[in-house]
Amino acid sequence: MATPEQTRLALVLNGGVSLAVWMGGVTHEIDLLRRASRGLRSGRPESVAPADQACFETWQRVMRQAHTQVLVDVIAGTSAGGLNGSLLAAAIGRGTALPDLRKTWQEAAALTDDRLLGHPSYNSVLDGRYFEDEIGKILHGMSGNQGDAEPVTLFVTATALDGLPEYLRDGFGGQFQVADHRRIYKFQHDPCAVVFRKAGAECDVWKPETHARRDFLDEKVLDRLRLAARASAGFPVAFAPVDESPLLGQRVRPAPEIPSQGRDRASWIVDGGLLNNAPFEPVLGAIGDRRVDGPVRRIVVYIVPSTGVAERHTETRPPCKATEWPSVLGTAVSYPREADFRNGTAELLALMNRQSFDRHLELYVRQIEPTHEPETDPRVELHKLSETLFPEYLRSRISGAVWKVRQLREEGRGVRSLVGIPQAEDIDDILRHGRRPSWVPESKSALENPAWRPWVWGVSVAERLMWTLVGDIERRLRANAAGQDSPRCAPDEDVADARRRDQSALTDALNGLSSCVRTVRAVQDTVFALIRNATEAGGAPADRLDPEQGPVALLNAVYEQLGLEDVLGEQVHSAVKAYADALRKVKGPAVSGLGEVEILRFCLIAEVVARAFSSPEELVEHTPQFEFLRLGPDDHSPVFPLDKYAPLGDRKLYGIRLNHFGAFVRPEWRASDFTWGRLDASHHLLRLFIPDHQERRLVETELHEAILRAEIGKEQMGRNLDELAEPDDSLLFQRYLDTRNGRHTAGRMVEAVLGIVVGKGSSDSGVKAEAGKVMFRRAFGRRVEAWQWSGPSRLVCSPARWLWWWRVRRDPATAMRTTLWAAMLALVSAMAGAFGLSVLVRYLWESDWSWTLQLATAAAGMAVLLGLEFIVTGLFCWAARHLRQ
């Protein structure tokens, strides 16, 4: 049987607050697809819930027909995506199934007194400690199996309340600072991870070594993952900030290897979605580190709970002066997030445009499989072209290396330079007067007679050469699989055996090439680290590098210290040998006679022709090939009528309502959003495997009907859509607030918000401020201790308090207007109380005082009474604080 192509998914999950429920449904469906593929690959039955069995079997049929295997090996999560992504990564890294997220979100996300509304801290509305404990129970409750664990890398983002300063220098020597509030934490399971470090009996020889990472099988690391997931999903005010201290060992942004003031300092961290932090760059770096053992199709899946459709501009919009303050405030909050997301997509587009391995591979294949027309022999033409372009290639390589060394050296000093690419005069001066670089060949004769040792082409060329050979092996494996799956008459047994032998030989070569690539990437990481650390004075004197020497001399010193001419030569030779051995075994006389030196020459010719005029980034850094898929709630289901429900878009989710807190309100709403997460995931994922629209529509309908049967049913979903189709969101919540449970929940939420306003229990204020807050809660709090009921402030504000709670519990949207009315009513109550006291005094003592004097005396008495209450409350606060201390 032919080796199926691997479809490797790199997930970037980005969402917030109660939209975590929708994202939980997406994660559930991706895990079901992953395990359906794993069951086919291993031949062992997978444990699947009976309700999901029909979906599981449908996914297995899709995988068979597409002749592919699905792996999830890179995950990045932001906000609610950080929580769901952490659970999925832990399941993969522990070799088990994803926990029942349906049950998790139904129970853990409930706004009830025993869950999220239990015991919130003084600076949050919801109980973050309960949420964190629930995450820990799920993570530690996964039954890990090291034998079934698969390689996976997880990135979790957060936002620091106090950003570390990043120091920059402009092109004229001026320095300035930019605060960086972004935080990224990395967790990994990779038993075959490679590092390049000193080894041997005296630790004096640099060599590659296996450095296994098993974070998800380590209970201590799981505790850090619990904290990171809780922080990333911790929407400000809804949840309290998290202390970053336990996570410093996992932090990769700001980069720990780049010095900065306070780089080892922990911060308080909150929701990673505040900056809409979608970490595409580290995700693509992790893709390049993955081991390859077959033809791979790499997909970056961006999962975001929004339609991705901008609001349509209309000419009937009101003029600017008519715009109300909520719209202005919402714009001020959302535009920075929009700008950051726009920067992320621009970065992704730039990375996609830097992919050039198709060009490398094309030039290489044209040489190993030339045409039979002598006058158009591409080998001769490309060889002549490479000799002509070699001087420009040499200049580009030196320019790129100088640019990168300057950048790394400044980073090592804690400063990043915003300087341009070296000018032509600088390169000419290096070529005429400087020491010759040891990482580029001196002349074009290196193309005619290439050598393994000493390897004079550098680290980046070694990596690109290996990726070119990997691409050719994958191309041959796909062609071999297409031949075996051909619908023509079945081949005879000899042909089938030959194809199986070819497949085995090519797969073995791919494994060897993948190991060499990982080693070379580890070497490059070490080179970059040594250049950054050249400013440090520590270490053995023989190993110290002079940071003041020129970029070329510094890079030469690093190559000499690490012995890279031999190390890289050995890896390149191993890669080419594995490739050549495979080609000798496969069918095809045009390439079976190629020698190792010829293969090396063809690769280097392709390198010179393809890279002669490349930018410094393209020459130094590797960007893997990938496709991009956006997965969002932006389409309807074929099960429901298009004309009626399609315009809803993301408004089909309850989690969009109430500023993204809607799904927390009712369990039925969470069940609906979870179901839509599964429906939307299947809709988008099927596009990867079934190109024909009609066929895909039939499979999607079958899959959606199975999902609805497993979840809430088609009829209930139809009723939900009818309810959500109403244009006014307030009606949706008004019906809920009309119920007893709805009024209770709204009251608890308002009470929690009121507690934040008055700073309940905060130790950061003085005694006077704390006494004022206690009196405010006593006057307007719905539930206070019995001994506070007789307080003058509570008695005076009783009518205002009753009005405020009665109105706000029924319609939270009227909180601002009701607060103004309540304040006026409290003032009227105080005046009425003063007037009542004056009447009582006049009646009891038959005083001859005038009404004016009596009113003034009564008002003064009320003020004295409230003042005495404030003094007594302050004394109690002072005593309580000292007792706590």
Image: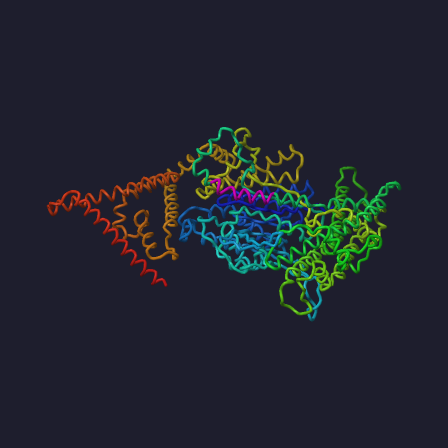
Q: Which residue is drawn at 32% across and 48% down?
A: 781
Q: Is residue 552 left or right of residue 637?
A: right
Looking at this rendering, what residue extends furthest in the bottom direction?
A: 202
The x, y position of residue 720, in whole percent, is 48, 35
Q: In which quarter of the image is the C terminus?
A: bottom left
- Write down the quadrant of residue 535 in the picture: bottom right
The x, y position of residue 6, in whole percent, is 68, 46
The x, y position of residue 857, in whole percent, is 18, 47
Q: In this view, does 115 lie to the left or right of 368?
A: left
Q: Is residue 173 left or right of residue 462?
A: left
| Whether residue 400 is visible | yes
> Could you say which is closer to the camera, residue 123 or residue 459?
459
Measured along the vertical axis of the image, is residue 382 above or below residue 204? above
> Could you say which is closer to the camera, residue 643 or residue 864?
864
Total numbered labels placed on residues in the image: 0
- Write down the quadrant of residue 148 in the picture: bottom right
| Whether residue 292 is visible | no
| Colouring method of the image | rainbow
- Span of residues in magenta: 330-345
The x, y position of residue 104, in whole percent, is 50, 48
Query: Magenta stretch containing residue 25, yes or no?
Result: no
Q: Is the magenta stretch mostly helix, strand or loop?
A: helix
Query: Magenta stretch containing residue 342, yes or no?
Result: yes
> Could you say which is closer to the camera, residue 465 or residue 864?
864
> Could you say which is closer to the camera, residue 143 or residue 561?
561
